[in-house]
Amino acid sequence: MKHLTKKRLSRWLTLAAVATLTAGLGGTVQTVKAADDIWTHATDLNGNRFPEPLDPDTGLPAYVPFDQAMTTDGITGSSSKVLSNAAGNNVAVQLTNSTWQSGSIWSTSKLKLQQNFSTKMHIYFGNNPNPADGMAFVLRGDKPTQVYQNGSGVGVWGVGTNQNIKGQMPNAFAVTFDTFFNGYNTDKNVDKVAAGFSSSENAQYIGWGFPGFLNGSNSAIMQYQRGAQGQLLFDKTNAADGGLNKTGYGTYMGLGGYYVPTKKSGEKFTDGQWHTVKVDWAPDTAKDGGGSLTFSIELSSSHTFSKTMTWTAADITKIFGTTAISQGVSWGFTGSTGAQDEEGVVTFETIPGLVDASVAATVTSRDGSAAPKSVYEGDALAQTYTITYNSSNSKQNWPVQNTSNTATLTGTLRTTTGYGFEVNANGKVGVTILRNGVTQTAVGTPTKTAQVTDKFGQTKTYATQVDVSLPGFLNSISGAQRYTVTAPILAAKKNDAATEGAGVVGGNNARYTTTVTTPAVLENPLGIGAPNFLFKNLSVGQIIKGLSGVTGTMDGTGNLVAAAPTGVHTTITASMTPVNFPAGTGYTAGKTTIGFTYSGRNVTLRDNNTAQTVYSADTPPTSGAITNLKLGMQPYPQIKLGNYTSTIIWTIAATPIAG
């Protein structure tokens, strides 16, 4: 005898069968971590190793090898020293490490101003209590063949007194990270001259301007009467705000801008910490070929200063020279010391042109179709990353390969606040890689796991982050290369549709982040799931005499599971339809019973459609096991051989809690 089960909901709900596909798993995870063989063993002025710059978000190294992209070669008089790791890769440059030095490092190729570019660096000054003089990020029409002034010049500005400023870098724009106050009108011509500061404060600051320009004589604009060529002055009224000003003599004047963190917050560069510098260029192709340059400097973990400069094509030509629009500009770092020494170390995390790649993430249904606009908690979707690499525009493999060409990328996969990656029974996340038409599987290692109950009461485990090893790209393969990485995700908790960070894919020479948009997550509606009851191999003789306490079996786990919204009273009832015995054999509905125990309640169902309460409480049931399953039947002398069934209808209802 077989008893099938049905479920009924007391409020509307569209249910669909969901097939969960789990890919076969294999391989191992190789996570890139900070290690002695990838960071330099060089030491600072005190004989201590430089701290390794790490990305606080991922824990990954915040630097890449720059062998083909940046160089100190061909620059006369430079104090720069390239710092290499155990593998022989250039991972940092020490611009200064003694007194009266001037060092620099420059790009091997130019930045094209018709294209977007972004670069991210980290600078380190040590924690010398008497530091001098600073570093500067510089854009220049052509790569220099010499270094410029040491001491107060910071490798870009002129040095002298009053009007006798000499030795400045021409055709350049510089952002200076100054660590020493030289005075207002002495040989320090790259320092703040803002009211409210005195030499005793020894304040550090950020300053920006144009070393090769005459700074004008309009005292209503300038802090003091007349600036000479190569001297960084500041705009008192903020009228030009560090840009190009065409007042005064009717010609271009390089007015400097500045920001002093110490007066406001006590922050400084020489704190023994790495400070992140980011520079982004956005061309204005709709107009005349100009664009906007945005630079930022992390002064502390909670404070980043940012500034945007906007230049026309005519400005660019005036600043960098006549070939800047057509050929681009060189970029690099300078640094200097005077009578006092200072650490001056730079690492590069993102270098334009080193690796031309991208990462994009999308969310779909598990079958690859478009994701719905909203889902319920516990519903299953898929998150797919498309990873692209263009060898034609890249100088290096991604990542730089080891001697056996087996280096891999590391994917740190994340999703939005309302979602997580589904963790399988083995405690892993099954990841599928589709590359060149071939499907591969990989093991994703989850972190920060939690659980969610779906609308059928089933508990599922998810992780907010997954680490996985991914194939790398070889520069020897021409053209664009790409593959996709798909991981299963679950709706984890009620949340609006959102766009958030989807993690990072990176190797030892480049790292790319992306965002993903997920559907809204709705609080679970009513849901219920029940097993089938099976009573087999009953003889005619048994039924003729009547049955009492015959034990049955249940398919699956034998659990009755249910889900309901929070804050409601949950009631589960069940009724059983008459067994489909043949007509005319004298059977009366209600003579067959099924009894069981559920959540501490003993329940007896008769096959006459009479509903019985199975569960009633202010919360959905937390334990779903049905026990003590028994079949009973009054004597039935006219029974015939056959396979007979009845249907149990389970109903879940949710009502507001009184009071």
Image: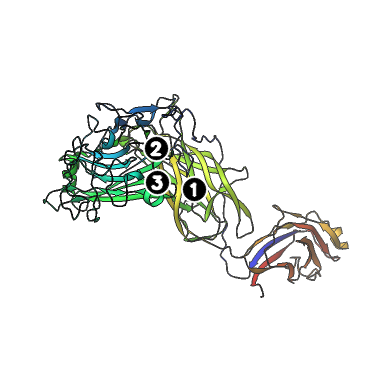
Give the side of residue 250 with respect to residue 515, left or right. left
Q: Judge whether residue 475 can be spotted in this image.
A: no
Question: Would you say the residues marked 1 and 3 are in contact, meaning their CB atoms lie under 8 Å apart?
Answer: no
Secondary structure under tag 1 reads strand
x, y percent for residue 427: 61, 43
Give the side of residue 124 with respect to residue 566, left or right. left
Instruction: Choose between 377 and 604: the one closer to the eye.
Output: 377
Distance in Å between CA atoms under marks 1 and 3: 27 Å
Secondary structure under tag 2 reads loop
**Nearer-N-terminus badge (1/2):** 1
Between tags 2 and 3, which lies in front?
A: 3
**Residues packed near mark 2 inside 10 Å, few (<14), some (14 to 19) or many (20 plus):** many
For the residue marked with disc 2, what is the amino acid? Ala
x, y percent for residue 132: 34, 36
**Residue carrying label 2:** 510
Between tags 1 and 3, which lies in front?
A: 3
Secondary structure under tag 3 reads strand
Question: Would you say the residues marked 1 and 2 are in contact, meaning their CB atoms lie under 8 Å apart?
Answer: no
Distance in Å between CA atoms under marks 2 and 3: 24 Å
**Residue carrying label 1:** 414
Distance in Å between CA atoms under marks 1 and 2: 19 Å
**Residues packed near mark 3 inside 10 Å, few (<14), some (14 to 19) or many (20 plus):** many
Point out the image quarter for the N terminus: bottom right
Say above or below: 132 vs 527: above
**Residue carrying label 3:** 299
